[in-house]
Image (cartoon, rainbow, N blue to C red):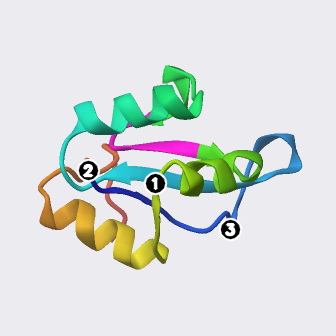
């Protein structure tokens, strides 16, 4: 099992910083880990879970591997699990 989490650097709701939680193996693995962490399915967005800074240490304690955001995205792409946002492309 390889669950990855980037540092809580992203501003979000409730004046918290947020991380992204992904699996470089499967979505099933990611959903299982998220349930164990106590995340709502509503926190899942396309290919990752948004994790508030208040759960970051617990995610790491449960086995999530801390990586920079660029590494997280590269591993997600390499696994073929990256789902990009749909919409207009800006040229």
State the image coordinates of residue 16 (x, y, percent, origin top left).
Answer: 81, 51
Q: Residues within 10 Å of mark 1 (few under 14, many from 20)?
A: some
**Marks 1 and 3, the one that precedes in the sequence:** 3
Q: Residues within 10 Å of mark 3 (few under 14, many from 20)?
A: some
Q: Are marks 1 and 2 in contact (CB under 8 Å)?
A: yes
Question: Is residue 46 on the magenta stretch?
Answer: yes
User: Between 4 and 47, which is closer to the camera in this rendering?
Assistant: 4
Q: Nearer the viewer, mark 2 or mark 3?
A: 2
Q: Report the side of 79 relative to 38 (left or right).
A: left
At horizontal 34% and vertical 47% (from top left) the residue drawn is: 85
Q: CA separation, marks 1 and 3?
A: 20 Å
Q: CA separation, marks 1 and 2?
A: 9 Å
Q: Residue furthest right?
A: 15
State the image coordinates of residue 45 (x, y, percent, origin top left).
Answer: 43, 37
Residue 80 got which mark?
none
Q: Are marks 2 and 3 in contact (CB under 8 Å)?
A: no
What secondary structure characterizes most of the magenta part?
A: strand
State the image coordinates of residue 21 (x, y, percent, origin top left).
Answer: 46, 51
Give the residue pinned by disc 3: 9
Q: Residues within 10 Å of mark 2 (few under 14, many from 20)?
A: few
Q: CA separation, marks 2 and 3?
A: 24 Å
Q: Secondary structure at mark 1?
A: loop
Q: Where 49 sits versus 31, above or below?
A: below
Give the residue pinned by disc 2: 1
**Marks 2 and 3, the one that precedes in the sequence:** 2
Quarter of the image that includes the C terminus: bottom left
Q: Secondary structure at mark 3?
A: loop
Give the residue pinned by disc 1: 63
Instruction: Identify the magenta region.
Output: 45-50
């Amino acid at each position: 099992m390889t669950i990855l989490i980037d540092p809580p650097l992203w501003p979000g709701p409730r004046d918290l910083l947020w991380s992204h939680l992904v699996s470089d193996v499967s979505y099933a693995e990611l959903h299982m880990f998220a349930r164990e962490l106590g995340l709502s399915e509503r926190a899942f967005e396309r290919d990752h879970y948004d994790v508030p800074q208040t759960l970051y240490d617990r995610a790491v304690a449960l086995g999530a591997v801390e990586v920079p955001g660029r590494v997280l995205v590269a591993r997600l792409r390499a696994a073929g699990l990256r789902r990009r946002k749909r919409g207009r492309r800006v040229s």
